[in-house]
């Protein structure tokens, strides 16, 4: 094992320039002394070649620059230490390590960058790697016009990112791309992409990805036209890993945690915990998308989610009772539980036998297919019936207020009714329609609400909801939409 050191830099002298590359064997170390530049760009070669088990330390105000793969290693278990205001950069990639178990320690204002060409990547590495970024450190490239640049590409999972406040992981096209699960993101700074997807994860063998976000994970607005779904994604996790996203602080620290852009998760029992200081939102005036994918997922929202939450297939649960903001949730398939909060929420059950609870605001509840239980809660609520009628699609309504609430009937399902207020002639209290004009029948004794398409004609009335028998429904409670 050999220790290599660049020439000393004397106080008051110009910085030292080294233009030859270094070759490190297994277990060797390289110390780039204060005020030194190792620069092989003119030689069109990497600055440091390594095998494995090497340590590189770049002291304050020093740098290493190469033409292609500034640091190049055929193995792993390599540690790169960047001290204050030091940096490693390359015309193409700054770091290209073939092996695993690599560690990157960036002190304050340190930087690993590349991107003189648009399609470059700052760091290539195997899995089981660790990135520690101190304040104002940069990994990737901070220039916003590098639209195809990628920050970090990792060929395996089990990686850890510790990103301090004001630190930045940046890619024009992608900030971080990882094949494999077991990744942990402890972000108090910013993870940012300008043009593609901020973080992409792909696992075909299970595992868990954990996001502890107290900073910003964000996708900026495109500078040039692109497909508006794909190009607004901030987190995309494919495969079957379990993704755990914790957004915001437990304590009273006065800082908002942001996830800005679309979130697409795949199979796995995923969790999104958005704490009181957390905001999940789109990056334009349009709503973003949070798609939890397949599996039995859990969303707990104590903060603000401006995106539409799709729970997807599986028996999912959304709990938003502590949230003060409006939210829109679609249960998708499965028997779901969806609990709104203090905002004016829009809750859709989708398929399955769902429980929808509106909460304190003026909410809109639509059970969809299945035998659902709808609870309005406080506020002026709307109970919507827009799914096909049938014995398997009868909803139970609780907490209906005859003073504030309304029943909305979609005209394509209730096609015998015209859009607007329900005529008093079309509403009848009893067991069946007694006139040809009757369309809605309310059996006060059983609480059953039915639709008769032809009044007292040949067709049978179809029950679509059941109310508490104490509820005195009137025609004025209905609106055809």
Image (spheres, helix red, strand yellow):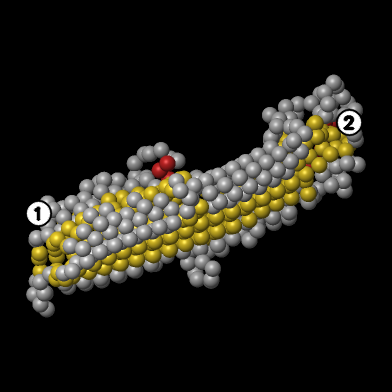
Name the residue rendered at 25%, 70% in the picture. Answer: 83
Q: Residues within 10 Å of mark 1 (few under 14, many from 20)?
A: few
Rendered location of residue 389, percent (x, y): 74, 32
**Residue 111 in view:** no
Q: Nearer the viewer, residue 22 or 290?
A: 22
User: What residue is rendered at 76% in x and 38% in y?
Assistant: 394
Q: Could one spot residue 131 in this view of the protein?
A: yes
Crowd band around label 2 with a 10 angstrom C-alpha radius: few (<14), some (14–19), many (20+)? many
Q: Name the one closer to the observer, 285 or 328.
A: 328
Please state, as top left, top right, bottom left or bottom right, where the C terminus lies in the image: top right
Q: Mark 2 or mark 1, which has the lower sequence index? A: 1
Q: Where does residue 169 sit, x and y in percent of width and height?
A: 34, 58
**Residue at the extreme bottom:** 11
Residue that numbered label 1 is attached to? 42
- Horizontally, is 143 left or right of 402 in the view? left
SS at mark 2? loop
> Which residue has dot 2 on it?
432
| Element at label 1 | loop
Determine whether 329 is above or below 387 in the image: below
Which label belongs to residue 198?
none
| The N terminus - image quarter | bottom left
Q: Residue at x 59, y 53 (%)?
A: 298
Residue 181 placement (x, y as % from top left): 43, 53
**Of the pair 449 and 402, the residue shown nearer to us:** 449
């Amino acid at each position: 094992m050999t220790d290599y050191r660049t020439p000393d830099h004397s106080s008051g002298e110009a910085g030292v320039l080294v233009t030859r590359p270094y070759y490190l064997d297994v277990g060797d170390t390289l110390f780039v002394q204060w005020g030194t530049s190792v620069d092989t760009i003119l030689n069109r070669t990497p600055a440091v070649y390594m095998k494995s088990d090497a340590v590189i330390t770049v002291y304050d105000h020093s740098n290493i620059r190469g033409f292609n793969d500034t640091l190049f290693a055929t193995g792993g278990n390599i540690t790169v230490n960047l001290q204050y205001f030091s940096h490693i950069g390359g015309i193409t990639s700054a770091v290209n390590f073939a092996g695993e178990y690599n560690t990157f320690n960036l002190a304050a204002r340190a930087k690993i960058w590349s991107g003189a060409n648009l399609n470059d990547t700052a760091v290539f590495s195997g899995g089981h790697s660790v990135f520690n970024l101190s304040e104002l450190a940069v990994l990737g490239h901070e220039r916003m016009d590098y639209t195809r640049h990628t920050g970090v590409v990792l060929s395996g999972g089990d990686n850890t990112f510790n990103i301090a406040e004001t630190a930045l992981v940046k890619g024009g096209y992608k900030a971080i791309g990882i094949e494999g699960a077991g990744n942990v993101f402890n972000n108090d700074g910013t993870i940012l992409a300008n043009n593609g997807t901020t973080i992409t994860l792909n696992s075909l063998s299970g595992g868990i990805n954990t996001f502890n976000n107290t900073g910003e994970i964000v996708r900026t607005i495109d500078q040039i036209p692109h497909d508006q779904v794909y190009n607004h994604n901030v987190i995309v996790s494919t495969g079957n890993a379990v993704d755990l996203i914790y957004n915001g602080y437990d304590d009273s620290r006065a800082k908002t945690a942001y996830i800005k852009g679309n979130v697409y998760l795949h199979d796995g029992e995923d969790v999104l915990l958005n704490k009181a200081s957390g905001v999940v939102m789109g990056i334009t005036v349009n709503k973003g998308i949070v798609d939890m994918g397949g599996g039995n997922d859990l969303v707990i929202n104590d903060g603000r989610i401006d995106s539409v939450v799709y729970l997807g297939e599986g028996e999912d649960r959304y709990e938003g009772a502590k949230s003060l903001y409006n939210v829109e949730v679609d249960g998708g398939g499965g028997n779901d539980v969806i609990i709104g909060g203090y905002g004016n929420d829009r809750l859709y059950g989708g398929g399955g036998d769902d429980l929808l609870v509106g909460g304190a605001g003026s909410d809109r509840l639509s059970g969809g297919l299945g035998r659902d239980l709808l609870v309005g809660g406080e506020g002026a609520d709307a109970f919507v019936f827009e799914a096909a009628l049938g014995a398997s699609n009868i909803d139970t309504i609780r907490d209906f207020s005859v003073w504030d609430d309304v029943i909305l009937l979609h005209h394509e399902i209730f096609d015998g009714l015209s859009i607007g207020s329900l005529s008093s002639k079309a509403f009848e209290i009893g067991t069946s329609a007694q006139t040809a004009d009757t369309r809605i029948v309310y059996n006060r004794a059983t609480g059953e609400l039915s639709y008769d398409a032809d009044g007292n004609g040949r067709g049978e009335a179809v029950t679509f909801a059941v109310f508490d028998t104490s509820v005195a429904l009137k025609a004025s409670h209905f609106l055809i939409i």
